[in-house]
């Protein structure tokens, strides 16, 4: 079973999976999203998701602060929930997802691992 088959089974299913996929795509994959967290003052938290060891938690308020209300509202709309609930879902799933997408404790280089697998996942999520 490939990493992406595993992720599809664990995280990237249905509306939540589509929302997380959209979030990652709109920020340039894992690398771009981590950069967004670093510029928002939460680099230490994002780096913990990449590094081996325990993932630091992130609150729904921190998700909203870094991603912005508009991004969270758009994701909430896709999920059919209010923005606070969407931010809570993201805060629960994103650390695990980034951790799984960086199995060697490093951001993927170049056209990162996520982008390479997104096409494969699209068939499973939307097919």
Image (cartoon, rainbow, N blue to C red):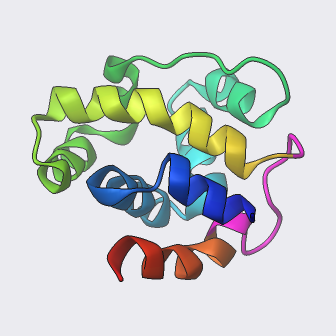
50 w.r.t. 7: above or below: above
In the picture, which quadrant includes the N terminus? bottom right
Residue 73 vs residue 126: left or right? Answer: left
Camera sees residue 77 = yes
Residue at figure coordinates x 53%, y 59% from the top left:
8
62 w.r.t. 89: above or below: above
Q: How many marks?
A: 0
Residue 54 vs residue 9: left or right? Answer: right
127 w.r.t. 79: above or below: below
- Determine the image quadrant of residue 100: top right
Asked whether 110 falls inside the magenta stretch, the response is yes
In the picture, which quadrant includes the C terminus? bottom left
Residue at figure coordinates x 44%, y 61% from the top left:
21
Residue at figure coordinates x 33%, y 49% from the top left:
16
- Determine the image quadrant of residue 85: top left
Front one among 56 and 66: 56
Front one among 10 and 108: 10
The span shown in magenta is: 104-114
The picture places residue 24, in percent across and down from the top left corner, at 49, 58
Camera sees residue 64 = no
The picture places residue 112, in percent across and down from the top left corner, at 73, 67
Residue 120 vs residue 53: left or right? Answer: left
The picture places residue 88, in percent across and down from the top left corner, at 31, 25
Asked whether 11 falls inside the magenta stretch, the response is no
Front one among 15 and 76: 15
Task: Examine the residues drawn in magenta and state their main secondary structure.
Answer: loop
The picture places residue 96, in percent across and down from the top left corner, at 60, 35
């Amino acid at each position: 079973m490939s990493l992406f088959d595993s992720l599809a089974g664990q995280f990237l299913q249905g509306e939540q999976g589509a929302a997380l996929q959209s979030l990652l795509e709109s920020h340039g994959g894992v690398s771009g999203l981590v950069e967004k967290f670093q510029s928002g003052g939460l680099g230490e938290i994002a780096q913990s998701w990449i590094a081996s060891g325990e993932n630091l938690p992130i609150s729904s308020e921190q998700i909203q602060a870094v991603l912005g209300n508009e991004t969270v509202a758009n994701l909430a709309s896709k999920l059919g929930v209010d923005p606070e609930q969407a931010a809570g879902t993201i805060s629960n799933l994103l650390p695990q997802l980034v951790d799984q997408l960086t199995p060697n404790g490093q951001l993927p280089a170049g056209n990162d691992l996520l982008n390479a697998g997104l096409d494969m996942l699209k068939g499973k999520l939307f097919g």
